[in-house]
Image: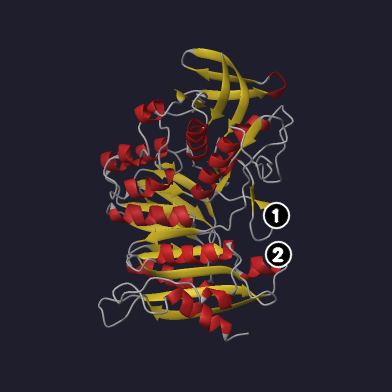
Amino acid sequence: MKKDVVIIGASDVGISAALRIRELDPSLKPLVIADNNFPNFSICGIPFFIGGEVVESSNLAHRKKKDLKNAGMELLLETRVEKIIPEKKKIIAVNAEGRQEIYYEKLVLGTGGVNIEPPISGLELPEVFFMRWMDDALACDNFIKKNQPQKAAVIGGGYVGLEMADALSKRGLKVTVIEFMDSILTTVNLKFRKLIKEKLEAEGIEVILNTEVKNIEKTDSGLKISGSNNLNLKVDTAIVSVGTMPNSFLAEDTELATNERGAFKVNQKMETNLKDIYAGGDCAETLDFLTGDYRYYALGTVAHKHGRIIGSNICGQTSYFDGSIGTQSIKLFDQVISRTGLNEKEAIAAGFDPISTEITTDDHKAYYPPSYKTYIKVIADQNTQRIIGAQILGSYYAEISKRIDIFAASIYNQMTIEKFSQLDLSYTPPLSSPWDPVQKAVQQLELEF
């Protein structure tokens, strides 16, 4: 079999690349290969399916299989690509029908990431779940429906771990979060971490810090989780979420370059070091817009951009990825915490001279109830007065994620604190103030200079 474009991976990178190719050159019909039966599903939506907010798992599909086929791409599902032979422009794929050799003109690697498996005994137990792919979500959901567990442990206090703690709590389980570090959500500032921890505890979630899980043991009454600091916890099920690493095994026995973390090395056109092979998303490194360095961001927004740029370049355009600033949000119960750009530690490491301020303000005019307390931190570089980072914590109803997007746009456009006040932002008393909260924060920072 020979194809003009072969795409390995049917998630954000793969589908975005295929759709862009079809937009620009309808004569090309990309072959998209996936090792599962869930093409173009929203992996980021899994916690909300587990929590019952998304009722049907099929609702997580951005597009149905027939939609993808109608868009002009071929799908080869439940097929594992075992090997790339770049010098022959060939891949080896295996599925229920046997072994196949597929030749390509252009190859796209969108293999995503894999869960980091910590050195904990008992991870193979059927009551223990990782939460990355739809198979994981369905297995966890079926376990809860069948066994009606009462208590759960979440190992890892990062974004996905806390979303899963929220989800399991919504399903009626008593949840304990166990974090190895001295804080949850270590990428945001200390005050915000403490506020989120207090929120979780107010919702009935126990948070255990500075504790290493070492063993998960099956007992007659469920699971026994033990570790440092005399950890001895009895639960019915456990979720493990301690991070992501690149799924770059296809580099084996090839000259495909990977970085120290194992991610495919790429340039701004998302080309690997081998001709006609592209890579993007969680399996590849990505350019940091602010520092100019390449790093690892496992973010869906980044993956979609990578895929679109790959598709454009395959079709003969010249498209470059300008870089990511790590913009992200998380909703926990009725609170949202968002961040973009650099924190002070990252800024110093990148050679900036950071200065920051924090404010607490209402999200809109308080005379229009209810208004919500909003916490904003903004960081600028003292030498250039450019905004280089921001974090916001507040109510789900206070447009937190869209307000962080204002900061993200300002960082991308290298805006100074003086120019930020000139932004013509919308105002009506139920939604904002004549000076939006983000502008109030920047004006406070201006006084620090």
For label 2, count other residues whose C-alpha is less than 10 Å away and answer few (under 14), some (14-19) or many (20+).
some
Q: Nearer the viewer, residue 227 or 260?
A: 260
Q: Which numbered tag is attached to residue 350? A: 2
Please provide percent x and percent y for residue 52: 28, 48
Q: Amino acid at mark 2?
A: Ala
Q: Residues within 10 Å of mark 1 (few under 14, many from 20)?
A: few
In this rendered view, identify the residue nearer to me: 426 or 306.
Answer: 426
Circles 1 and 2, Cβ within 8 Å, touching? The answer is yes
Residue 401 picture location, percent across and down: 42, 62
Which residue appears farthest toward the bottom when viewing the image?
447
**Which SS class for mark 1?**
loop
Q: Which residue is mark 1?
A: 293
- Examine the rendered structure and indicate whether residue 201 appears above or below residue 77: below
Q: CA distance from mark 1 to mark 2?
A: 9 Å
Q: Position of residue 205 (x, y in %)?
A: 36, 62
Amino acid type indicated by mark 1: Asp
Q: How many numbered tags mark residues here?
A: 2
Write down the quadrant of residue 66 in the picture: top left
Q: Is residue 265 above or below residue 418?
A: above
Classify mark 2: helix, strand or loop: loop
User: Where is the C terminus found, in terms of image quarters?
Assistant: bottom right
Q: Residue at x 34, y 76 (%)?
A: 364
- For residue 270, which quarter of the picture? top right
Residue 355: give its label: none
Image check: 166 left or right of 132?
left
